[in-house]
Image (tube, grey):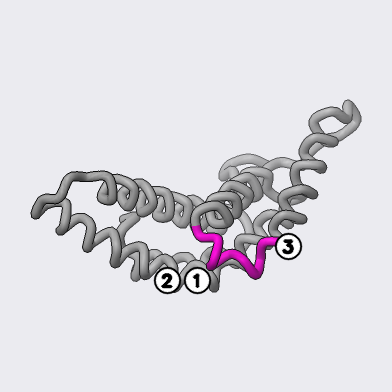
Amino acid sequence: IWHDIGLLEQLWSSWLPQDGPPAYVAALSIREAVLRTLEYTDFTSAAPPSTLARGCEERVRVLSQRLSRFLPSTLPSVGRLIERHKTSLRVCAVGVELVVILQCRYPRIAAEWQQEHVSQVTQWLTQLFSSAHDPTFSHPPDASSPGRS
């Protein structure tokens, strides 16, 4: 499913702005699609020329172009995932990972959000560090985990 960008765009548009499990699933699927596309892009660029490699390269190029067109619209929602650290540590952690991947591998797309994302990631890491080293801190149950209260 990671390569069906049309279906994923619909899922991401409706689930990413939500809280809890829908946002978590959307963030994980964006991460998976981006990582797979980047992996295959690297693979096809390093592969020796052949008919199979050209076919794969074309498919990966199309996927990469569609992701590149869609990702800018997801950046504000991904930034909001990081801000939700009080509600869901898992959703926030995937948001941080996604921001780092997008800032590193799609710098032109993510450029206008770079300063905000760096600030959000820094605040999240500071909060995480403080929470981990504060014996009185009690993190609320993770809302992204079904069955937990």
> Which residue in the protein does label 3 denote?
116
Image height check: is 41 above or below 12? above
Is residue 70 on the magenta stretch? no
Marks 1/2 in contact by CB < 8 Å: the verdict is yes
Image height check: is 73 above or below 3? below
Q: Percent x, y for residue 114?
A: 67, 61
Name the residue located 80 percent from the left edge and 35 percent from the top edge: 129
Q: Is residue 113 left or right of residue 41?
A: right
Viewer-nearest of labels 2 and 3?
Answer: 3
Q: Is residue 10 left or right of residue 132?
A: left
Name the residue located 22 percent from the left edge and 45 percent from the top edge: 47
Q: From the image, which quarter does the C terminus lie in?
A: top right
Q: From the image, which quarter does the N terminus lie in?
A: bottom left
> What SS does tag 3 mark?
helix
Q: Which mark is residue 10?
A: 2
Principal secondary structure, stretch drawn in magenta: helix
Q: Percent x, y for residue 135?
A: 88, 26
In 3D space, how far apart are the residues under numbered discs 1 and 3 (Cα atoms)?
21 Å
Q: Percent x, y for residue 43?
A: 29, 45
Name the residue located 36 percent from the left edge and 68 percent from the top edge: 65
Q: Quadrant of residue 2?
A: bottom left
In 3D space, how far apart are the residues under numbered discs 2 and 3 (Cα atoms)?
26 Å
Identify which amino acid the numbered label 1 is placed on: Ser
Is tag 1's residue or tag 3's residue first in the polypeptide sequence?
Answer: 1
> Which residue in the protein does label 1 denote?
13
In 3D space, how far apart are the residues under numbered discs 1 and 2 (Cα atoms)?
5 Å
Disc 2 crowd rating (10 Å Cα; few below 14, some 14-19, many 20+) is few
Q: Is residue 85 left or right of residue 145?
A: right
